[in-house]
Image (tube, helix red, strand yellow):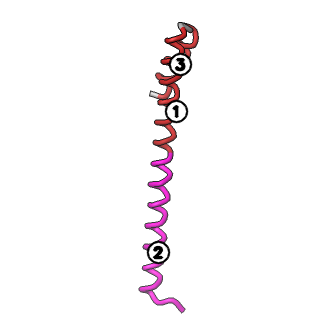
Amino acid sequence: MLGKQNIKKKIKLGSLMSQNRLQVANQAKQMHRLNIQRNIEHRLEVAKAKGDERLVRQLEAEIKYFG
């Protein structure tokens, strides 16, 4: 049978593990968003270099959306 001390330790450990998972998930979310922004910015540079005004407008709208 588990004593009160062991139960408290297990609860605390579970809480820390949940917090760590949440931090990792948040970091992954931020990195994903950053990668999307970088990708759009690169595509925008290429579209400008090619003179594709329609695509430039579309990508600028995407940047505002993700901004």
Q: Quadrant of the N terminus?
A: bottom right
User: Residue 65: x percent and y percent?
Assistant: 50, 25
In the rendered image, residue 3, in percent from the top left (x then y), is placed at 47, 90
Per the image, label 2 sits on a secondary structure element best described as: helix
Q: Which label is found at residue 59?
A: 3
Disc tally is 3
Mark 1 vs mark 2: which is more N-terminal? Answer: 2
Res. 11 mark: 2
Span colored in magenta: 1-28
The 10 Å Cα crowd at callout 2, few under 14, some 14 to 19, many 20 or more, is: few
**Closer to the camera: disc 1 or disc 2?**
1
Camera-nearest label, 2 or 3:
3
Q: Is residue 14 magenta?
A: yes
Q: Amino acid at mark 1?
A: Ile
Which percent across, then down, holds residue 64? 47, 22
What residue sits 47% from the left and 78% below the top?
A: 10
* Residue 8 percent coordinates (x, y): 43, 79
Q: Is residue 13 above or below residue 2?
A: above
Of the 4 image quadrants, the one containing the C terminus is: top left
The disc label shown at residue 36, or none? 1
At x 47%, y 49%, the residue is 26
Amino acid type of the residue tagged 2 in the rendering: Ile
Q: Mark 1 falls on what kind of element?
A: helix
Q: Which mark is residue 55?
A: none
Residue at 50% across, 44% down? 29
- Distance between mark 1 and mark 2 Cα atoms: 38 Å
Looking at the image, residue 29 lies above or below residue 12: above
* Secondary element at tag 3: helix
Task: Looking at the image, tell me whether mark 3 or mark 1 is earlier in sequence order.
Answer: 1
**Residue with the most extreme bottom position:** 1
